[in-house]
Amino acid sequence: MEKRAYLYTKDGILLEGKGFGSPKVARGELVFSTSMNGYPESLTDPSYYGQILVLTNPMIGNYGVPKEISSHGILQNFESEKITVAGLVISDLNDAPKWNKRLSLDGWLKENGIPGIYGIDTRALTLSIRDKGTVNGSILQGKTTAKQRFEDYEKKDIVKMVSTPKPMFYKNKKGNGKTAAVIDLGLKHGLLSEIFSRGYSICRLPYDSKIDDVLSCKPSCVIYSNGPGNPNVITKTISTFAELSGTGIPMLGICLGHQVAILANGGSMQKMKFGHRAINKPVIDLVSKRAYITTHNHGYAAYLNGIPKGFKPWFISPDDGILEGMVNSNGNVMTVQFHPEAKPGTHDTSFIFDMFFKKVSKHARR
């Protein structure tokens, strides 16, 4: 028998739908994504930690959830080892057969203890979020009278909840003998795959690692990953980035790593009204003048007037003028706000890794 479920928002919206997944209560920041596919990858993206995800595509679950595929300890078809969203809001729940399906979406959410609600007009809800801004919300199954509590997403240092608690090493036996130090702010396994496929071993480090911890890996380069939450609260991460910038080691920042780089060099970040979350967002390369379709998942951003001194803009968003990438004057620090490593795609900007590792090779020959 289908359970009634209710979606509440802090600004007073109450929507009735049908519950699926775990019967637990979900609380978090309500955000939307306009992606039309890739829900297994989105739901396992640590950048969504603590958030209730609204998917605008009307039919979700129609190809089930596959069995995990791993190579060298790196997942090939998920972005992390478990679902990281707090809850899921969709319009139509589908359960169609597929050759590599292990579980239905409903079964997968149950297995991970994640609540969901369907039968919701997700596009109307998205218009509300777009017009009024991101809002905190909750999902309850089977009751409407419970007193509501809403999580304060802004002030939490939630990166520590998704970062590795201790160093991890991925040895590339067929590689070039070089190591990339990756500061895990809530990284996606797609990033590990991109690095590993280019011949590098990986030293994966906690988000609050000190400069000595990073240098102990004897890295050829340092990469700051994506992750969730407010970049202004991870002050230890920002401080270490600033110290590493002075060493001359090639550095790459992605998404939250991009934001950390801005703050570490005196720039500024601000909360967006409703964020960029999808796999179909355009950016403009200011060098080549070409446009690319990219994957995004962020609720904070910098505009051109927030770029640090000593950096020049590399990419911008044609939609709202947000700074989507930058390079410093020395050429050793590159950053992008979007995800060149994203699964299921797009892969239009994977050339950024080729550019970066070419720079790493040149630096090593000096």
Image (cartoon, rainbow, N blue to C red):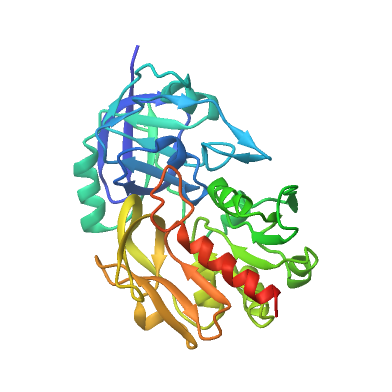
**Vertical comparison of 313 with 209: above or below:** below
Looking at the rendered structure, the number of numbered marks drawn on it comes to 0
- Determine if residue 276 is in view: yes
Q: In the depicted view, which residue is nearer to us: 259 or 244?
A: 244
Q: Is residue 45 left or right of residue 118?
A: right
Q: In the depicted view, which residue is nearer to us: 267 or 321?
A: 321
Q: Is residue 158 left or right of residue 342?
A: right
**Vertical comparison of 154 with 325: above or below:** above
Which residue is the extreme one toward the top?
A: 1
Query: Residue at point 48% right, 63% down?
Result: 352
Q: Is residue 131 left or right of residue 41?
A: left
Residue 256 coordinates in the image, percent (x, y): 50, 63
Query: Residue at point 36% right, 27% down?
Result: 61
Which residue is the extreme one toward the bottom?
A: 309
Question: Which quarter of the image is occupied by the C terminus?
Answer: bottom right
Question: Which quarter of the image is occupied by the N terminus?
Answer: top left
Residue 86 coordinates in the image, percent (x, y): 47, 40
Residue 79 coordinates in the image, percent (x, y): 53, 43
Q: Is residue 64 left or right of residue 257?
A: left
Q: Which corner quadrant of the image does residue 16 belong to?
A: top left
**Vertical comparison of 44 with 314: above or below:** above
